[in-house]
Image (cartoon, coloured by chain):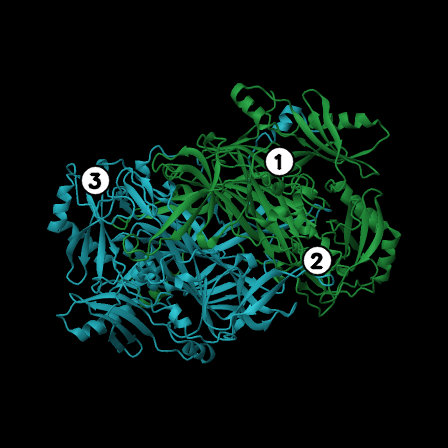
Chain colours: A green, B cyan
């Protein structure tokens, strides 16, 4: 069986890559692999494959370091020919992402470092106290950031839970911060964190640690738990309504291919509904999380959770009956570890259905007959842990042709120490001695459309505005109209809720009912754009975070809004640069980048672990179909749903008044 | 057992009201009742009741017409003293709402009217064809609208389904429209609808009807239905986690009282969480649905679905296993009919729990231990049918102290005829000969807070903005801050997403962790305000629809954003007038009115029945609690959830590569 050109790499292919590359260096060189993944075929090649079954060559994209140096390479391996096609050093100023092994090693080395131990000693901790080190990505400020480094944030476990490895150390941040060099794999210096008020940037030297109350998230340390929540069981006696076969998922007229890589995690290819093509490729393309504390070293704090670490790399091993309910299929992801070996991310994606209330209902008031169908959804979920924080990422499909990308932001706030009684305007005190700085989460969803099988799509926006009052055409002042305007050139574009501005992707085909172009509209909540100023490194590194919509003309391998290398870079090489080509995007093969996010001003309620904040972006048909595409969903019936009646006094009215009239 | 002062009227109390009032007119006068409902005690009385158990007198609010006249009355009955306390004629220009009996009678009379029959004859319909009449509320244009009237829209059933009473006649709108007078209960004239293009307002005289294809929503007329949707059953083997007792609902630390009336439907009173007071009263207070077609008679089209008809009056009889899943309790609503008799709205409210994915999760990447809890929600749902259209209205509570009001807009578009090949800028052709005009849905949620038991609440807004770049205080340009400002006086206020402006209700108590005022924030999606111009009747009748937030100082009986009488009025007497008092709202007993809605530019996909558009407004604790209030929710486990594993080839990678490494 030959592999589909868009299928993720196999174990053999990964081993072939690392073998070929290591072979080139001989045995004495040690490499640190930062990613081995499918180098997807060009669209041209895919078109050939689809029309003539010509299988394009399999290629891999590989990033690696030569250990003990900052030499970082990007390599394309032709797997079909079993040879390295290109191998070049990545320009200075660009770095590879973190990896699990490196982070754990940095922790170990940092904690064992004598200067770190000396700082710990100054804390005068009770016997048996446990100090924890969280290496954080460095960010960038253009100062001494040529070498890839970690900013290590240090924490204490609550002394009473010193031996509980899942004690929440984020409730006890310490005020010194080792700097870790990834070339030498050593601590290079200790920095001290500001813990005072106002704009003072003076760091606080390490002093005996004030011990504070624990604030734990694991259940056994939060007894008594609630006892009045009764089980809720989702059963699917006839099994699931979806099928998964050779990475192709089919459900309720939807069909698409799922792949998985270390950076984006889940990627959807060739999404169609009822046999009509919709999207060539959809994935979360990037995310930036800039923090608002202006004081060093926090001024550099800005995580790119995909480019700096990777949504595939950090995917959780999902457990049956925990992360979702009902009949669940799991997909493993295959990535490479730091030594270039295959690394299975077990159960990285779960696939299940859920009920989502009513999809449509109408009751004829004359006959009292209600016609109604419930809304079933298909969910592909992957959950990533980025150090302290979690994102629950999901593609959600409904039966009416709508596809939603949902993000739930949860996990533990990134915390820092603050002196008692102090308050600062860029953070919330969420626990005694604990500051949670304000931060933004700005995500970018990349949508490569092929509506109605057409590589000639356009981006338009629709607005609604009043008609001017006019004795002949709008005599009563109630008239208003909607109109569409094309986006002519690649660039960044904004929402405007006062105009109800909605962006839509149009095909070049028309709906036979009303002759409008068949389209999908993009429903995205407005966001506050990046707050860092335009001259800041925060801004230059996340310059996609200034507009809700970017559109570019398609070019192969332009996949990540923040560019190929986000970690510790000083500016992007991403969507903004591509958009600046000022390409025409009318009736073109175009890519739409949808930015959305949260302004997170933490609350006490977000600690010690945060109730998920939910954000959704939807792609919704707009005159794509000739009628409600869910009109043929079978009605909701008790025979199938088997609900249970809970008897109560139906209302107090009755019990007071005796029998009903 | 004595009734709680906030309990809805009983059957006996309703009969007492109508009996007392009818008695005053003698037997020869015939009255048409338009509402008999609890006249809620004043807050002063409720405070007395809560502190000294002094039971206030029971009172009812009654509206009625003297039949055959436009004389419309509002009456307060003291039920405790069994006497009419006040009875006065409502000023000219204000009218009572529709009622079921009147609508059905108007239909019958209209269809039998000789002029209407003459119009039908001109259609030259095939034998057995069925014409349907939908009386619509009149709206207002200041022209000949002193008398309360219906604008009757006429439709044809698809000839092939002439005998199917649930055939979708909205797919075949006719171009004549009888005007119905509710005083004489007769058709007064026939109007002709514009069916052409552009701004022409020339009506189309009735001609032989062009027959078009059916477009049906009932399942048996949409065969074949999908056959690949497997059952999904929600079971709660130990029953529900909520209790309902004498109208008081308790669930997961929430406690509140539910009442029901003909106008608002569900009303929540005395909402608390974990023993801490939150809201004195919450309900949907009003809704306006203005249409954008400027041509008569559509220029008047503007429905106030609560004030013109009533969310309680139109509540569906919900069915087990159809409208929700799991263990479900139903509450009946008791209202009065047009003759002043008790009318039970059976199963008007359903109460059930639902799973809503993960509430929070954290995985310790060092131990790989995942702590996670699922999000259970309590839903109180009521579904209303307003002629062609449906609203699914729900209060949703979660375990983290958040309360959401959810609206799902579904049902059938209000349609009008359009000539073949014609397109207009204020509507979408959704089927051959069928125009669905653009319209807005603007709803108003009334929140009367008493945070932390305090009648001294304030409304504040929080914004986030960059710090100016400054070498000392913001040297890197990344700094940003949040700040809160109080809203000082009653008025209308706006969102501003570029500032991340969020409104919050603050108590006068402080959170011990960070000394911030305990607060609830209001999360409301931005809406496009009412588009009709400020001199239009649309605007004057819905002047609450111009701002996302209104705040007023509390006064008894100020309940409805659009005023007491919306039907066919020429201007409101509602929240805008009350806000214009310019009361101080700092540390006051205040009321917050949250406006939200949809700009509905119909799509083909919204016909013949519309996939629900979902809008949510949330009230979310903000430093109200000292930590995540859901930290004590028991973990999600397979033992309780009993999910099922669906075996698939885990990935295609594996099947190609043989056994795992």
Q: Chain of mark 3?
A: B
Q: Which residue is mark 1?
A: A558
Q: CA distance from mark 3 to mark 2?
A: 69 Å
Disc 1 vs disc 2: which is toward the camera? 1
Q: Looking at the picture, does residue B511 appear above or below residue A559?
A: below
Disc 3 vs disc 2: which is toward the camera? 2
Residue B27 position by quadrant: bottom left
- How far across and how far down the image is residue B325, in percent? 44, 48
- How far across and how far down the image is residue A310, in percent? 67, 41
Disc 1 vs disc 3: which is toward the camera? 1
Q: Chain of mark 2?
A: A
- How far across and how far down the image is residue B474, in percent? 70, 60
Q: Are marks 1 and 2 on the same chain?
A: yes
Residue A508 badge: none
Q: CA distance from mark 1 to mark 2?
A: 35 Å
Q: Nearer the viewer, residue A309 or B51?
A: A309
Q: Are marks 3 and 2 on the same chain?
A: no
Task: Confirm or deny contact between disc 3 and disc 2 (CB under 8 A).
Answer: no
Residue found 72% across the figure and 27% down from its top: A86
Q: Which residue is mark 3?
A: B163
Whether residue A515 sits left or right of residue A41 in the image: it is left
Q: Which residue is mark 2?
A: A415
Residue found 16% across the figure and 36% down from its top: B126
Secondary element type, mark 2: strand
Q: How many numbered marks are there?
A: 3
Secondary element type, mark 1: loop
Q: Does residue A170 appear in the picture of this structure?
A: yes
Secondary element type, mark 3: loop
Whether residue B608 sits left or right of residue A235 in the image: it is left
- How far across and how far down the image is residue A449, in percent? 51, 35
């Amino acid at each position: 069986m030959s592999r589909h050109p868009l299928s993720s790499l196999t174990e053999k292919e990964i081993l072939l890559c690392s073998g070929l590359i290591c072979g080139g260096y001989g045995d004495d060189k040690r490499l640190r692999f930062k990613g081995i993944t499918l180098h997807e075929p060009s669209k041209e090649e895919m078109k050939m494959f689809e029309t003539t079954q010509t299988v394009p060559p399999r290629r891999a994209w590989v990033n690696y370091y030569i250990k003990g140096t900052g030499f970082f390479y990007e390599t394309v391996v032709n797997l079909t020919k079993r040879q390295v096609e290109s191998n070049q050093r990545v320009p200075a100023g660009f770095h590879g992402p973190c990896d699990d092994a490196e982070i754990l090693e940095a922790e170990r080395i940092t904690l064992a470092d004598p200067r770190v131990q000396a700082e710990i000693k100054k804390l005068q901790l009770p016997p048996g106290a446990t100090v924890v080190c969280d290496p954080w990505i460095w960010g960038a400020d253009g100062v001494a950031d040529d070498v890839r480094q970690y900013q290590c944030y240090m924490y204490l476990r609550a002394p009473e839970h010193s031996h509980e490895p899942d004690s929440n150390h984020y409730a006890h941040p310490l005020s010194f911060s080792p700097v870790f060099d990834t070339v030498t794999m050593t601590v290079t210096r200790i920095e001290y964190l500001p813990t005072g008020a106002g704009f003072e940037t003076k760091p606080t030297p390490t002093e005996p640690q004030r011990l504070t109350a624990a604030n734990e998230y694991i259940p056994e340390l939060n007894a008594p738990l609630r006892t009045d929540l009764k089980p809720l069981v989702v059963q699917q006696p006839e099994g699931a309504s979806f099928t998964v076969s050779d990475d192709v998922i089919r459900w309720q007229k939807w069909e698409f291919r799922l792949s998985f890589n270390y950076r984006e995690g889940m990627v959807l290819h060739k999404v169609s509904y009822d046999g009509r093509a919709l999207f060539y490729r959809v994935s979360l393309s990037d995310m930036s999380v800039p923090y608002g504390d202006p004081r060093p070293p926090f001024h550099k704090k800005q995580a790119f959770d995909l480019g700096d670490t990777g949504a595939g790399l950090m995917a959780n091993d999902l457990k049956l009956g925990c992360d979702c309910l009902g009949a669940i299929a799991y997909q493993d992801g295959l990535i490479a570890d730091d030594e270039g070996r295959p690394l299975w991310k077990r159960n990285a994606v779960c696939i299940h259905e859920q009920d989502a209330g009513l999809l449509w209902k109408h009751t004829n008031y004359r006959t009292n007959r209600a016609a109604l169908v419930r809304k079933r959804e298909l969910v592909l979920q992957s959950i990533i842990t980025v150090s302290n924080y979690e994102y629950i990422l999901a593609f959600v499909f409904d039966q009416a042709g709508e596809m939603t990308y949902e993000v739930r932001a949860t996990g533990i706030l990134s915390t820092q120490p603050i002196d008692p009684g102090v308050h600062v305007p860029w953070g919330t005190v969420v626990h005694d001695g604990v500051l949670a700085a304000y931060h933004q989460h700005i995500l970018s969803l990349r949508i490569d459309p092929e509506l109605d099988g057409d590589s000639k799509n356009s981006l338009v926006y629709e607005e609604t505005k009043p008609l001017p009052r006019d004795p002949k055409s709008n005599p009563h002042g109630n008239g208003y109209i909607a109109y569409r305007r094309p986006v002519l050139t690649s660039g960044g574009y904004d929402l405007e809720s006062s105009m109800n501005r909605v962006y839509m992707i149009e095909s070049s085909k028309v709906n036979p009912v009303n002759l409008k172009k068949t389209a999908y509209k993009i429903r995205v909540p407005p966001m506050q754009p990046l707050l860092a100023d335009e001259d800041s490194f925060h801004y230059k590194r996340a310059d996609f975070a200034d507009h809700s919509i970017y559109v570019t003309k398609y070019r192969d391998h332009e996949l990540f809004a923040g560019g190929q290398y986000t970690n510790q870079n000083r500016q992007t090489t991403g969507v903004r640069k591509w958009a600046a080509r000022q390409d025409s995007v009318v009736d073109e093969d175009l890519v739409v980048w949808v930015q959305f996010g949260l302004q997170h001003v933490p609350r006490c309620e977000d600690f010690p672990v945060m109730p998920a904040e939910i954000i959704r972006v939807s792609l919704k048909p707009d005159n794509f179909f000739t009628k409600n595409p869910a009109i043929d969903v079978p009605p909701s019936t008790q025979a199938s749903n088997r609900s249970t009646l809970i008897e109560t006094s139906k209302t107090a009215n009755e019990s007071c008044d005796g029998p009903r009239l």
